[in-house]
Amino acid sequence: MSVSKPAVPVAVNGTGNHNNHIEMRDTHEQMYKRRHNLYPSKVTVVLGAQWGDEGKGKVVDMLATDADIVCRCQGGNNAGHTVVVDGKDFDFHLLPSGIIHEKCSSVIGNGVVIHLPGLFEELAKNEAKGLKSWETRLIISNRAHLVLDMHQQVDGLQEAEKGGKSLGTTKKGIGPCYSSKATRNGIRVSDLLGDFKVFSEKVEALAAMFKRLYPDFSIDLNAELTRYREFAERLRPLVRDSVSFLHTSLKEGKNVLVEGANAAMLDIDFGTYPYVTSSNCSIGGVLTGLGLPPQSIGEVIGVVKAYTTRVGDGPFPTELHDEIGSLLQKRGGEVGVTTLRIRRCGWLDLALLRYTSMVNGYTALCLTKLDILDTLPEIKVAVSYNLNGKKIDYFPGSITDLGQVEVNYITVPGWLQCTENVRDFAELPAQAQDYIRLIENEMDVPVKWIGVGKGRESIICVKD
């Protein structure tokens, strides 16, 4: 039982002289309550729950209708989010998907690594498709690190050195840039906008280090520095302290939406290491990538494809190597937005999803691409793994163990009906409803949205 104590008088100048002006300090309980309720609005987070390509962009686009600010918190232009509006495909790699909404501000946070040529090219392409007024709505953190062309060159050189053991990176320079950040010779946006002589020295030092490490590395420093002097002036109006901007916005009651890039199983700590990306794409990356405290987080929405896909190498317990896998690939249009590589396809894996939910704390799920399963007479769902002949209640941390698991499936009937035009949960075929309820029961997380098509209008909102 806690007992409230009276407010305590303190001297403002700290001398303890009671003849000085005295203020009343709040009790610990009052301070606790004020800090606990510091943010009248809470941040909504959208995260990929599998190996990426779950359809996060469309979910963010839907939720951005009610958002004031949409943020990217990590990763770089190795991400690819597609939003379809009025039949036009908008492809985003660095920009938050919510930038389409003209009332939304868009923040590229400190945890993002930014390739400026790619950013300006992306803006131009989407502007040609109808993106408007981004100049007044895009905010870039002064603490974000820059991906230079030399990082991309090094990415390719590192992959070449691995030979047949390539990790299948996008070669966008993301890994080398995060490596520079970790070894404290990275270059930030604030460096570019500061003393250009100091920026030039940092670029030269980084280039000299890469040359020592990789004999085939080459760079025209004069051309690179000339180009970045021009970039600095284009970038300057967009840059600000994003941490203070977001905290002020939350205290003012603004609705903030965070768009996670990549996905939980590509997280550098919790994914199928080393077949992962170079950033934390789980809930922890949201906090460090934007400078947000845990108590500011509200909803954490896990986006789940109705089956499983992944791009590149690495273990994939439910992968299908038969005609059903080919069917999912063709019907689902499973080609990477960034890499243009064919995605590997397999059955939905609930053992994997329970693991990523444990890490991220999903409060709700959005199930996408349900319509891709429309033509299957029966559907398998992975519910658990066996390792060395015994059922395990954890997700293997070793890719060797994960590659050796035996998957325990349950088989459910398909619905053999087109769901593309359904807009109400009650109108879904009974077998499709059962499939969704199975996911909810196994995950103990409600499915609040269901995607049944490409467009922003093709999402079913599930009402309690």
Image: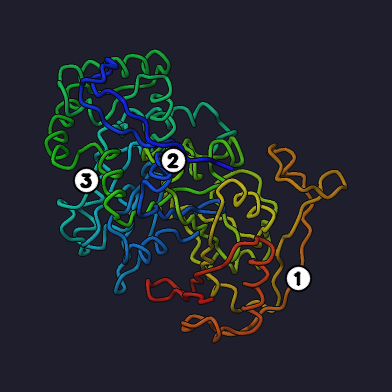
Residue 344 position within the rendered picture, expressed as x and y whole percent measured from the top left:
58, 55
**Residue 411, which numbered label?**
1
The residue shown at (60%, 59%) is: 308
State which mark lies toward you, 2 or 3: 2
State which mark lies toward you, 1 or 3: 1
Q: Which amino acid, by three-letter code, is at mark 3?
A: Phe
Q: Which amino acid, by three-letter code, is at mark 1?
A: Thr
Res 13 quadrant in image: top left
Q: Which residue is mark 2?
A: 32
Compare residues 44 and 251 and report the one nearer the observer: 251
Nearer the N terminus, badge 1 or badge 2? 2
Q: CA gap, disc 1 to disc 2?
A: 51 Å
Q: Badge 2, how many Cα within 10 Å: few under 14, some, many 20+?
A: few
* Image: 305 above or below 8: below
Compare residues 336 and 96 and report the one nearer the observer: 96
Q: Which amino acid, by three-letter code, is at mark 2?
A: Tyr
Q: Is residue 193 left or right of residue 296?
A: left
Residue 298 position within the rendered picture, expressed as x and y whole percent measured from the top left:
45, 54
Residue 46 position within the rendered picture, expressed as x and y whole percent measured from the top left:
45, 55
The residue shown at (49%, 58%) is: 301
Compare residues 20 and 42 and report the one nearer the observer: 20
**Residue 120, which numbered label?**
3
Nearer the N terminus, badge 2 or badge 3? 2
Residue 147: tell me if it is visible: no
Q: CA gap, disc 1 to disc 3?
A: 48 Å
